[in-house]
Every structure is written in C-alpha cells, then in structure tokens.
Image: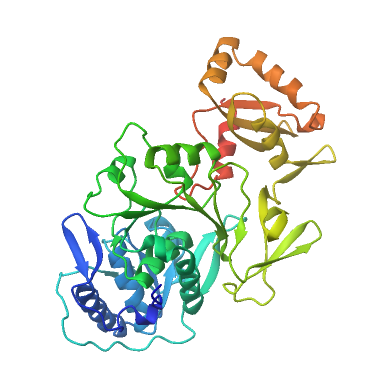
Amino acid sequence: MKQPLSLAQWLNTPRPAEMPVAWQEEHTWTLGHLRYDVARLITQLQQQEGERWALCFENSYLFIVALLATLHAGKTPVIPGHSRVSLLNEQQALFDGVLSDKALDWQGPLWVVSSPMTEVTSETTFPAIREDAFIELFTSGSTGQPKRVIKPVNLLDSEAALLAVRFAERMADCRIVASVAPQHLYGLTFRIFLPMALGLPLHASMLWYAEQLVALSPEYRYVFISSPAFLKRLDQQLNPPPIEMILSAGGMLHWQEVTQTAKWLNIWPDEIYGSTETGILAWRYRQQDNVAWLPFPGVRFQPENDYFRVFSPLIADTNGFFLDDSLQFVENGQFHLLGRRDRVVKIEEKRISLNEVEQRLLALDGVREAVALPVSRGGRLSIGVLLVLDDKARQLWHQCGGKAQELTWRRSLLPWLEPVAVPRYWRVIDEIPVNNMNKRVYAQLQELFYETP
C-alpha cells in the first residue's frame, strides 16, 4: 500500500497536474485546477481580517478548495453543519465570515467560491499549514444548542491513515461517490480526507436517490459512502451500478437493509462505529446478523460503573471520552452495541429503559422498527411508541381497527416489562423519520403524539 498523503501534502507532493481530483457531470477538476483555485482563494483570504471562516458548500470540490485555502492562509475553517441562512445569522458569534459556492443572504462577510477551470502546470509554492492547525465542527448537543468540537488536522490525517490500512487495497483504482455531506465528520473523513489522502477522484455532488447511483458511468468502479437512511430506500427494481464497496455509518444499519443491499449489489456493506467527538472507533463486516464490532488499533474501552470511557489515538484529550452508548463485550475485545445509555425515564418512581422497551417491541411478530418515547398528557407521564410493521401485520392492524391489536401487543409485553413501561400510546407509521445522517430527531418524533384540538 502506498503511503497516504497528509492534508499538508495534498497540493505540494509532486504529482501530474492532469491527475483527476473530482468530477461533476461533464466537469473534471484536476490537481492543476485545484492548485490554481486554492492559490487564488489564499490571496483573497489573506486580505481579509476575519480569522474564522464558515464553510457552507454543496459542491465538494469547492469545499476542498475552501478548506485548503483557509488552512494555508493561516485561518481556521469552521464547519457549522448546515447552510441555512436563518441559523447562520443566529450563530454569527461562531465565525467571522462565510465561504460558500452560492450567494447567501447572510448578515456578514461572504465570499462566493468558484472555479474558472484554469490549470496551474508550473510549480506552485503554498504557505505552510500551522502544526497546531485545527478544524471546528458543530454538532447538535443534547441541550439543542450547537456543540463545538475541535478536530486537529494531524488527527484527521491519522484517521485517514488508519482507514487506509484497512481499506486502501480494496479501494484502489475506484472513484468515490457519497450520499453524505462533508458538513459532518463522517462525510469529512470518508468523502474528503480518505480519497484525497489516497489520490482517488471524488464525486462533487451528493447522491440523493438510488436513480443517481444507477446513472453512474459503467466505465469506472466506485466506492459508495452511504448512510443507513439511503440504503433503506434502495430500489431493488433498478439495474445495479458498478459498486465495488459500500461504507455505512452515522446510525444503526438494520439487518434487513444489509441483506437487501447485498442482494441488489452482490456486496456486503462495511460498517463504521464512531462519533464526531471520538472519530472512528470500530468496524464490522457481517454476512449474518449478530456480528460484533472490532475496535480499530489503539482504541481502548475502560469500564466506569455500567458505562465506558474510550481512549484512542484520534482523541486529543488524554482523559478520553465518556460514551453515550452501552456496550457488551465478547471474546477478543469485540463488542455489541446495546443502545444509548441516556434513554432512561422515570415513571411512577420506576426507571424505564426506552431501549429495552424498543427491543421487546422488535421481538413481536410483524414489527420491523420501533421507537419508544415519553409522552406527557394531563400531567401524567406514559410511554408512547412508533411502529413500522411488515405487510401482514399492517393489514391485520387495519382489519382490527388498531385497538384489538394494541391489546394483544400489551399482553405480549407484560411478561417482560414493568406495567408502567408497557406503552399506553401507539402510532403505526410508514417509516421512522430521520435526518440526513439517519439520526432520529426525538423532538420531531414527539410531535406525532400531539393531540389535535
């Protein structure tokens, strides 16, 4: 395996100017284009007083231009996690200006980044990137306020190198396509850092639909960086595209989606476990359901009471990071994920695990997906559940009018759950709403239990 490049080497390492970096429809950007576009933006940024620049892009090639120019200019790139003007105006204190690929009605300094498709063929010298350079990301915190996460560039380089050890050989000579944005760490790591470190061309556009995946040119082979939400929506009736490898992260990939994906593409997904704060932690490749997670080299879990603190070469804090997930370890240091530890509510002085309620619901015949939530009505707290049923169970639900089936489900749950943990409110829906990273937004799910006046 060739040595992956660090971010500081992406522009400076001697390589052919005509080497493709990214493409979008009929456009192909080369390393020569990238050098020209970054050099031009560095000059513009050096004339600006602001130090912290928010990166708000749909085009991933232009995102790379902005990321490199910001760092080489000695500035700090800030990734707010969105491009919504109303939120940018609300979060003005988090950055000094915005770099984007489109005009935004933002109440502050804005620079629209573009590419004139001009190549630099001669040697170009770029200012050195500071050794302590970092990228700021903002992720949604448990309080609803954006949570600031500092990512040193050298740790992001280390993460790409760690991934290269496991995946570079399988990714060789492939192109990278993705249904996840670099506005989040998963997209930043797998869609930007990893292909740039390995010198693999990346698709500048997001894939939103399976039809876009199918429309990829059969001239090339592809690695698909996906989320569970996208794999869940694959259309098995379409002709499969030439996908060589699938990586999935950002949420739990259910076994049904694994088998459907493998059936359509004739390959099994590789799954990644981690978080914005920790980076990658573990990996698994399963051709049967109950396969444990294998930690990446250097990742160590330390039990604290019933939970775990994780230490990793990718975590700058020497105190490690306290996980929100519950783990169950098996042989050889591998583990199973049991769910988030913070999903516990107290009802009538009894601690109720919403994860346990969901697991018991999933054991019922015909239940494909389940979400349990606390629902407050008339000053009384109870459990409400959202269910996605298979066709047979859904038909039975409609035939019974719902109430009879609810009673059957309650009776089935009573041997396993405290009476106050048995759901009081039931909703059968077509699918569980998630955001674009396949994360459940619990405030949005709560709205499904609001009573209409």
Instruction: List the single residue furthest toward the right.
Output: 349
Residue for point 40% across, 75% down: 4
Colouring mode (rainbow / by chain / secondary structure / one colour): rainbow
Quadrant into which the C terminus falls: top right
Nearer to us in this view, 446 or 355: 355
The location of residue 101, given as percent across then percent down, is 27, 63
Q: Quadrant of residue 325?
A: bottom right
Residue for point 36% across, 70% down: 198
Question: In the figure, is residue 417 to the left or right of 218?
Answer: right
In the displayed structure, 17 sits above or below 86; it is below
In the displayed structure, 151 sits above or below 210; it is below
The location of residue 293, given as percent across then percent down, is 61, 54
Question: In the figure, is residue 53 to the left or right of 321?
Answer: left
Q: Quadrant of residue 51?
A: bottom left
Residue 100 visible: no
Quadrant into which the N terminus falls: bottom left
The location of residue 300, given as percent across then percent down, is 67, 68
Residue for point 22% across, 72% down: 19
Question: In the figure, is residue 393 to the left or right of 168?
Answer: right
Residue for point 14% across, 74% down: 118
The location of residue 257, given as percent across then percent down, is 49, 39
Q: How many numbered badges does the structure rendering display?
A: 0
Nearer to us in this view, 207 or 114: 207
Instruction: List the single residue furthest toward the top.
Output: 399
Residue 61 visible: yes
